[in-house]
Amino acid sequence: MATTITATRQVVENYQRLFVNRRAYTLQSMRPHPETGRHYYFRPSKQGTDLPLMLTYETTRQHLEGKITVGLYAINPSTQRCKWVAIDADYKNSMEDLLKLQYHLTRDRVEPALEMSKRGGHLWIFLATPLLAKECRIYIHDLALRLGVPVKGSGLGDGIEVFPKHDAIGAGEFGNAIRGPLGIHRGANRRFWFYGADYSLEAQIEYLNGLRKVTEEELRRFIAGKERPEPDFSPRPEKLTSMERKPGNGRAEFRILEHIGTVRKLGRNYVARCPSCADCGHDRSGDNLAILIEDPRFYKCWAGCTKEMIRAALGCPIRVRHSA
């Protein structure tokens, strides 16, 4: 079991100043999913209503003391700015990429904090004042491109994930949350600390407070004349199954847009909630499923669900043609 820790008022207030950019949050389930064994995140609401709960001092204190585990959103939709940038890497040899990024960030006089994680690590960059999410993302994506560090979602299955994951979000939207540091990861049943300081809340917060924060002037200088490379989110054309070929065999053509909920446009695709992810409590942001606009027969879940899983979740399983 994780060691019980008490969070002082000063620790809680400093934590909020460093990490909390909006009061919306997610909560990690205390109990594992009966089928997958994973502890999924959800947006908590007031009992008996659909009104979301807001992050408070007490919520933050409970997170730091290990009684609950919260997920934090990077972007404040009223300003499109963030207080921090987090680089998440949990693939094979990902720590090498994080250390490479950390070294080159320090050459820009940026002082990132490296946090342990269950399968890899997180690299956190703190900002002197909230800065535009789009400009933060340009900086990190450009650096990763120059260093040859893979970025997940840009045609690659494995790579770093950059939080915030969006350049901007609309009113009432949330983007993607990331586990709040210094709490207990329910799946690992342990607390992950930042390298560079003793393993106590006071020492960790003092370390984070002492890191040099990136200013707006510096960020603008880093990205001068640069633009974030547009990732290719288009689902790769795949061989069509018999159920997805154009009519001519007496069966109706399967049209995925007729079976899913709200979609929105993102580049060359529609994005929507993946039905298979939703069945497992995933995809709270509703954007795991990409559907090619010019030909909706091509679709892909970026969390790894197969077409068979998606179709089964919709109640329209793919029929398998057996050879004689």
Image (tube, rainbow, N blue to C red):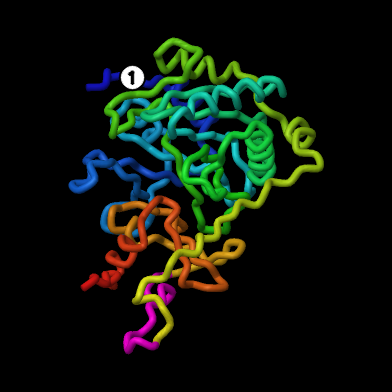
* Residue 109 located left or right of residue 309: right
> Residue at the location (42% across, 33% down)?
57
Residue 315, visible in the rendered structure: no
**Residue that appears at 49% across and 25% down:** 95
Locate residue 129: give its quadrant. Answer: top right
Residue designated by label 1: 6
| Residue found at x 38% / y 23% | 192
Residue 56 seen in render: yes
Q: Name the one closer to the observer, 55 or 268.
A: 268
Above or below — where is 118 with respect to 164? above
Q: Secondary structure at mark 1?
A: loop
Residue 189 locus on image (x, y percent): 27, 28
The magenta region covers: 248-261
- Is 74 or 222 nearer to us in this picture? 222
Main secondary structure type of the part rendered in magenta? loop
Q: Is residue 310 left or right of residue 9?
A: left
Magenta-colored stretch includes residue 252: yes
Quick check: 114 left or right of 39?
A: right
Q: How far across and down, in percent of the image, does residue 26 sit? A: 39, 44
- Give the mark count: 1
Residue 97 lies in quadrant: top right
Q: Position of residue 43 (x, y in %)?
A: 37, 50
Residue type (three-letter) at the residue carrying disc 1: Thr
Q: Position of residue 257 (x, y in %)?
A: 43, 74
Q: Could you say which is closer to the camera, residue 295 or residue 102? A: 295
